[in-house]
Amino acid sequence: MKFNNSPIGIFDSGLGGLTVFKEIRKILPFEDLIYFGDTARVPYGNKSKETIIKYSSEILGFLTDKGIKIAIVACNTSSSLALDYLRKISPVPVFGVIEPGAQKAVELSLNISGRKIIAVIGTSATVKSGAYSKTIKEKAGLLCGAKKAEAVNISNIDFNENLEIIEKSCPLFVPLVEEDFLNEEITKNVIKYYLASVIKEKPACLVLGCTHYPILKDFIEKEIGNSTEIIDSGVETARSVKNYLEEFGMLKSGTKYGNEIFFVSDDSERFKELGGKFLGRPIDNVYVVNFS
Ligand code: DGL
């Protein structure tokens, strides 16, 4: 019982993971949450696998020292490249954001007859890893005999006659979000630029394969149109975490609204201001942690 009342740890390279935090809070109001945003080292999306594993392990260690009951890697880049390693070293269960988003994309495309295209947008490191293609294929039960995902800017893998996956990296989206450029014309133009090749394919769904991207969702939606369903991996992750906690009897007891505490590796004032804007309410309790 004591362990069930321990907090949930959530981390990202910066502000993006707050989109997952928000969904978790929505459906698990009584859980205590600890968030870590690696604001000194964002973005992760253009870094090597080794570096991403190093940063992610440091943060996981910090959170497990705080006594968390589960860890949520609220970062697609880290989930793509570091999840296996984190699961090996972690004393608590570790959740990534790729699997739930991939699962939802497969579920949606099962209902479509004819050509089904699943599009995924993410950071360069996530797209290069091929993690979404691999996971979608696994989920679709079609991994055997499928061609290997190519680590290129756009990889388009025909893995059966009707189902295709398009992965597109959008490396400027994260800096635009972190710089709070949401209402700037340049942001709309960058979205148009990156999505042009995806829109041409008329995908059935578009997975927002980076936790920063839901912050741009309204603009993305306008650009891609409403015949493409947008999948927010944060929403799907929150659902699967809730199911897990219920299934294993790990929900916090009581009906007192959960505590929240935030850690960043740089500039807590900026995080308070921008993070509060993204969460739609003020953020207190922000502390700076230095790993070096
Ligand atoms: N929000 C993260 C993701 O989901 C990381 C973005 C970055 O730091 O480049 O991939």
Image (cartoon, grey):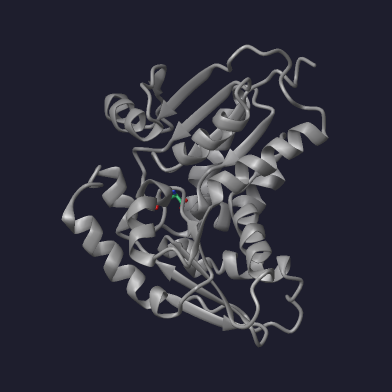
Residue at the left extreme? 185
Q: Is residue 109 above or below residue 9?
A: below
The residue sitting at 60% across, 21% down in the picture is 32
Work out which quarter of the rendered image holds the C terminus and state it. top left
The residue sitting at 65% across, 82% down in the picture is 159
Q: Is residue 204 above or below residue 78?
A: below
Residue at the bottom extreme? 161
Res. 288 image quadrant: top left
- Percent across and percent down for residue 273 are 28, 27
Q: Is residue 202 above or below residue 70?
A: below
Q: Is residue 124 left or right of residue 61?
A: left
Q: Is residue 247 above or below residue 225?
A: above
- Percent across and percent down for residue 99 are 65, 55
Residue at the right extreme? 248
Report the label total. 0
Res. 24 image quadrant: top right
- Percent across and percent down for residue 18 are 45, 36
- Percent across and percent down for residue 170 are 36, 63
The residue sitting at 24% across, 44% down in the picture is 179
Q: Nearer the viewer, residue 140 or 201?
A: 201
Work out which quarter of the rendered image holds the N terminus and state it. top right
Q: Nearer the viewer, residue 277 or 211?
A: 277
Res. 278 image quadrant: top left
The residue sitting at 61% across, 45% down in the picture is 237
Q: Nearer the viewer, residue 143 or 89?
A: 143
Q: Is residue 54 left or right of residue 110?
A: left
